[in-house]
Amino acid sequence: MVMESPERNQDFCNKCDEETIIFCPSCNSEIRGEYIVPGVISVTSSYSFPKYCYNCGTLYPWTKRILKAANELADKIEDLPKEEQDRLKKSYNDLVNEGPKTEVATTRLKNHG
């Protein structure tokens, strides 16, 4: 893979102040960035950071932090029974995986929001 503009790399993220990475911490595969088609100019970008490694399936550190924060929030909802807290936590995982259960998880979260 060729890095299009390596001079634009940053040591730390300007949004979360975490150290930036370009390789998966688990399998050392390169993290895919935005795909640039040679000769085509794009005015808008639909790129979003990947949530997990395409090669080994491990969640990236930023995804793990988001899930951890969401799970901590679910634990703090005092008037919610433990079983329902656990269901919410599972819904968070289903949202991240973007699979067949994502729509069900989205509906479940909307009903508790």
Image: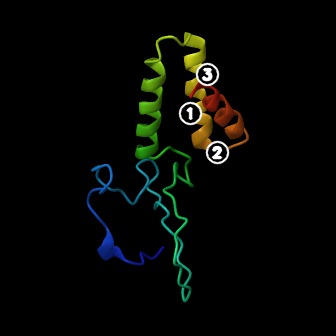
Using the numbered discs, state the Cα–Cα distance from disc 1 to disc 2 in whole angstroms: 10 Å
Give the numbered dot on residue 98. 2
Q: Above or below — where is 50 with respect to 103? A: below
Using the numbered discs, state the Cα–Cα distance from disc 3 to disc 1 in whole angstroms: 9 Å
Q: 104 and 58: which one is in front?
A: 104
For the point 56% across and 33% down, the residue is 92
Badge 3 is on which residue? 87
Residue 103: image location, x then y, percent: 70, 39
Residue 58: image location, x then y, percent: 51, 44
Q: Secondary structure at mark 1?
A: helix
Amino acid type for the residue under numbered disc 1? Tyr
Using the numbered discs, state the Cα–Cα distance from disc 3 to disc 2 in whole angstroms: 17 Å
Amino acid type for the residue under numbered disc 3? Arg
Query: How crowded is the residue under tag 2: few (<14 C-alpha within 10 Å), some, or many (20+)?
Result: few
Query: How crowded is the residue under tag 1: few (<14 C-alpha within 10 Å), some, or many (20+)?
Result: many
Badge 1 is on which residue? 92
For the point 29% across and 57% down, the residue is 14
Specify whether 15 is left or right of 70: left
Specify whether 84 is left or right of 49: right
Q: State which quadrant residue 23 falls in.
A: bottom left
Q: Would you say the residues marked 3 and 1 are in contact, meaning their CB atoms lie under 8 Å apart? A: no
Locate the C terminus and report the quarter of the image it occupies: top right
For the point 53% across and 84% down, the residue is 41
Q: Earlier in the sequence, mark 1 or mark 2?
A: 1
Q: Secondary structure at mark 3?
A: helix
Specify whether 18 is left or right of 30: left
Q: 19 and 13: which one is in front?
A: 13
Amino acid type for the residue under numbered disc 2? Glu
Q: 49 and 78: which one is in front?
A: 78
Give the numbered dot on residue 72. none
